Amino acid sequence: MATKLSISAVNELDYRDFIHKFGSVVEMTSLCAAAVCAKRPFWSFDSFVAAMCQFIDDLPEDGRAGILRSHPDLADRLESLTPESQREQTQAGITALSMDEIKQLKHYNRLYNDKFGFPFVICARLNNKDAILGGIQTRLYNNGDQELKCGIEEVKKIMLLRMKDLVECEDSKL
């Protein structure tokens, strides 16, 4: 992996480089990075993360749902995933599912998307295939408001881990 940036280096990136570096921390939603770029300077890694979270939280409901709609279905074709999602799904064992497990996950993905209007989002790096399969079944019982909130919290977990891959964060409390 490339060398991590210091927070001062993050603050010194020009707009284009900032978007290139952080445009994928929220899956396929470089708008988050673009909006937060103007909030610099960040005083710490934690303040950078807080700015990203605040931007997401301040979005209207449709905007937050749009972030969730930008995520791929789990067990989607590997070649259609971002490199970050490919790595995360592989680590969680999603790419090693049996044919029956793939069929089951695709079935639950369809039910979930039909009910909520966006894909099931879970932080794959913090889960394994069994937790993911169980999680989607359990979360199908949520109502729309609960699931929007739960999905966005998962997005934030994914974002935090991706940011930790890119930025020095030894002093972080997160």
Image (cartoon, helix red, strand yellow):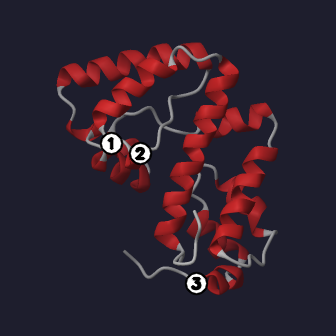
Q: Secondary structure at mark 3?
A: loop
Asked whether residue 91 is in view, the answer is: yes
The reply to whether discs 2 and 1 touch (Cβ–Cβ < 8 Å) is yes
Mark positioned earlier in the residue sequence (3 or 1): 3
Q: Is residue 27 visible?
A: no
In depth, the one of 96 and 42 nearer the eye is: 42
Mark 3 or 1: the one toward you? 3
Q: Which residue is mark 3?
A: 6
Q: Which mark is residue 67?
A: none
Residue 100 image offset from top left, x and y in percent: 20, 19
Q: Which residue is mark 2?
A: 81
C-alpha separation, residue under disc 3 versus residue under disc 1: 32 Å
Q: Are marks 2 and 3 in contact (CB under 8 Å)?
A: no
Three-letter code for the amino acid on which mark 3 is drawn:
Ser
If you read the primary sequence from the N terminus, does the residue marked by circle 2 or circle 3 appear first?
3
In three-dimensional space, the C-alpha distance between marks 2 and 3, rounded to whole angstroms, equals 28 Å
- What amino acid type should be assigned to the residue bearing mark 2? Leu
